[in-house]
Image: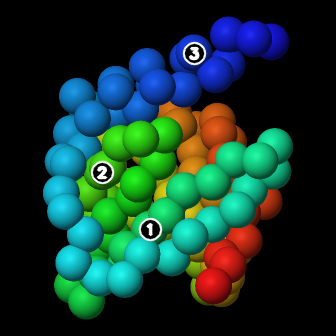
């Protein structure tokens, strides 16, 4: 499965083209450490939206409706799910960054 590291940047680029805006963060970012040594950071905006830095790219995410105490942010095919200090990132419905924990 060596194609996965090559495919991730292509999928993130596709998310950008599908409607994600590249925006500068205006809030202090929260860093997440995930399975397989992966990680990303998210700046949660006072407006309720968020900015994610992932795989060397930055995307603006809009807060969306979610169930069960979770928060969901998305743009195009990229979705961030957050519950407390845990998070995951899905790309086109597939878990790309899983079992992520915020670290200070």
In the depicted view, which residue is nearer to us: 8 or 90?
8
Q: Quadrant of the C terminus?
A: bottom right
Q: Position of residue 8 (x, y in %)?
A: 54, 26
Against 25, residue 9 (above or below) is above
Q: Position of residue 18 (x, y in %)?
A: 25, 31
Dot 2, crowdedness within 10 Å: few (<14), some or many (≥20)? many
Q: Quadrant of residue 69?
A: bottom right
Dot 1, crowdedness within 10 Å: few (<14), some or many (≥20)? many
SS class, disc 3: helix
Against 83, residue 56 (above or below) is above
The answer to whether residue 77 of the structure is visible from this angle is no
Name the residue that disc number 2 marks.
59
Name the residue that disc number 3 marks.
6
Q: Quadrant of the N terminus?
A: top right
State the residue at coordinates (69%, 47%): 38
State the residue at coordinates (64%, 22%): 5
SS class, disc 1: strand
- Which labelled disc corresponds to residue 42? 1
Q: Quadrant of residue 49?
A: bottom left
Q: CA distance from mark 2 to mark 1?
A: 10 Å
Q: Which of the marked residues, 3 or 1, is nearer the chain's N terminus? A: 3
Residue 42 horizontal side relative to residue 17, left or right: right
Q: Position of residue 74 (x, y in %)?
A: 38, 55
């Amino acid at each position: 499965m060596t194609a996965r590291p090559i495919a991730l940047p292509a999928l993130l680029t596709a998310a950008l083209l599908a409607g994600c805006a590249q925006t500068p963060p205006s809030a202090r970012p929260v860093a997440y450490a995930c399975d397989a040594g992966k990680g990303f950071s998210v700046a949660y905006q006072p407006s309720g939206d968020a900015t994610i830095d992932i795989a060397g790219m930055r995307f603006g995410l809009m807060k969306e409706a979610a169930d069960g105490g979770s928060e969901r942010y998305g743009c195009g095919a990229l979705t961030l799910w957050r519950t407390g200090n845990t998070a995951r990132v899905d790309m086109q419905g597939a878990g790309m960054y899983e079992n992520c924990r915020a670290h200070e």
